[in-house]
Amino acid sequence: MSLMIGISGGIGAGKTLVASIFSILQVPIYNADIRAKEIMETNESIKVEIKDILGPSSYMAKGHLNRTFVAEKIFNDRFLLAKVNGVVHPHVAADYKRWHTKQASPYALEEAALLYESGAYLHLDAVIHVEADQTIRIERVMQRDGIQSDQVIERMENQWPDERRKMMADFIIYNDGKRALIPQVMLLHKRIIGMSQTSI
């Protein structure tokens, strides 16, 4: 079975960009954040629980997740965030395990913003941390999401600090605009391939 490698990083660090480079190398990518949103829109029991926690405005008329409303609620209230994560994360974890059993490559990546916070890292063989300065991350998220810096900082406060992530990570990729990403990814790809061969 292929190795289970996680890739994470604080909001705005660029983990999706880094994951996309790995995908060019034919590494399968499981995006936990995208799948979580899909599961929240297709699993009826989850819909009921989310509405109980956040209210009926959590979903729009046709059953689509009201992402703006949900984000405003959970990013301003750690208690609500923890409750929603407690509902969604077990389903995502089960979905990931089903997905991974179908992979035949030497390793596959699980990309997740809350890889550590959710406890998902516990079932992985190694974790890649994507690192970028906080000022760079704030600017990126402001441009990407069209929000103010104080809103970005609020979201950051709901994630583990980078220092804690770095201490627990097995590998670090720097996305600081100073060091080229592709050579870092290529080098790490070779290392993980080596790990997969020694684990057989």
Image: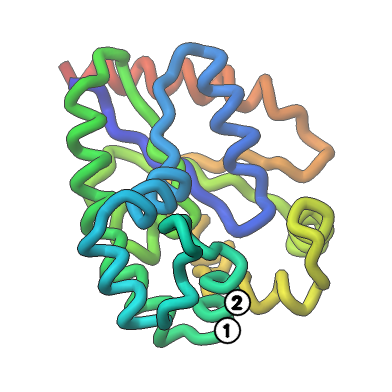
Q: Can you say whether 127 is above or below 44 in the image?
A: above
* Residue 78 in the image: above or below residue 161: below
- What residue is drawn where x is 68% and y is 54%? 12
Q: Which amino acid is tagged 2?
A: Glu
Residue 41 image offset from top left, x and y in percent = 38, 53
What's the residue type where badge 1 is placed?
Asn
Q: Element type at marker 1?
A: loop
Question: CB atoms at circles 2 and 1 under 8 Å apart?
Answer: yes
Q: Name the spot of residue 53 as percent of width and height, x first.
A: 35, 82
Q: Position of residue 85 (x, y in %)?
A: 35, 68
| Image coordinates for residue 166, horizontal then vertical, percent | 52, 56
Indicate left or right for 5 with 163 as reference: left
Image height of 8 relative to 96, above or below: below
Q: Can residue 151 be seen in this view?
A: yes
Q: Crowding at label 1, few (<14), some or many (≥20) Cα neighbours within 10 Å?
A: some
Closer to us: 171 or 18: 18
Q: Which residue appears farthest toward the front when viewing the image?
A: 61
Residue behind mark 1: 76
Rendered-image quadrant of the N terminus:
top left
- Name the residue located 24 percent from the left edge and 29 percent from the top edge: 100
